[in-house]
Amino acid sequence: MSTILVTIALLFIAGNLYYFFTNKTYKKSQFSTALFLKLFFVLLGVALGFAILYYALSLHTVILRVSSSTGEPADESFFNLLYFSGVTLLSVGYGDLIPVGAIRFFALIEASIGVLLPTAYFMKAMDSSKDK
């Protein structure tokens, strides 16, 4: 049953993405594949960079705690730190991991980049569409 639901959900998401990228209803709207890919890879690079930074900091002290009543230290494997970095960068903030100590400052910087960078790319796309 769960396999069927997952398949339906993935097909629904794929259909919506296909519709979004192929719909030409709005003549003035433009989609720049180059800008989209550039933004994707820049965000991926930023997330990886912060994950490496978090990993380096985790070698010296506890930087993440589990969001529970005990507040126990979280598993600070690289993939867990990459997950935390992605959740922070994309401003998802599930609340399952809590930064402690100096990492809070870096998490704030990363979240700011995650908000400002797509805005800058959107403005760049709007500016380049005016030129055409």
Image (tube, rainbow, N blue to C red):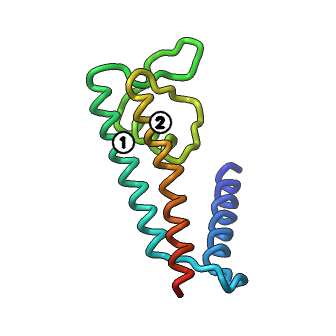
In percent of the image, x 64 and y 53: which residue is there? 3
Cα distance in 3D space between marks 1 and 2 = 11 Å
Marker count (numbered)? 2
Residue 17, by quadrant, is bottom right
- The reply, left or right, for residue 50 in relation to residue 71 is left
- The reply, left or right, for residue 21 in relation to residue 39 is right
Above or below, comparing residue 19 to residue 67 in the picture? below
Instruction: Name the mark on residue 50.
Output: 1
Q: Position of residue 71 (x, y in %)?
A: 52, 15
Residue type, mark 1 in image: Phe
Above or below, comparing residue 48 to residue 53 in the picture? below
Instruction: Name the mark on residue 88.
Output: none
Q: Position of residue 25 (x, y in %)?
A: 72, 83
Disc 1 secondary structure class: helix
Disc 2 secondary structure class: helix
Question: In front: 16, or 55?
Answer: 55
Above or below, comparing residue 53 to residue 127 in the picture? above
Residue type, mark 2 in image: Leu
Look at the numbered discs 1 and 2 and tell me whether their residues touch, using CB distance below 8 Å.
no
Q: Residues within 10 Å of mark 1 (few under 14, many from 20)?
A: many
Question: In front: 113, or 98?
Answer: 113
Instruction: Name the mark on residue 108.
Output: 2
- The reply, left or right, for residue 126 in relation to residue 3 is left
- First in sequence, mark 1 or 2: give its number: 1
Residue 79, by quadrant, is top left
Nearest to the eye among marks 1 and 2: give it: 2
Residue 20, by quadrant, is bottom right
Q: Residues within 10 Å of mark 2 (few under 14, many from 20)?
A: few
In percent of the image, x 59 and y 36: which residue is there? 94
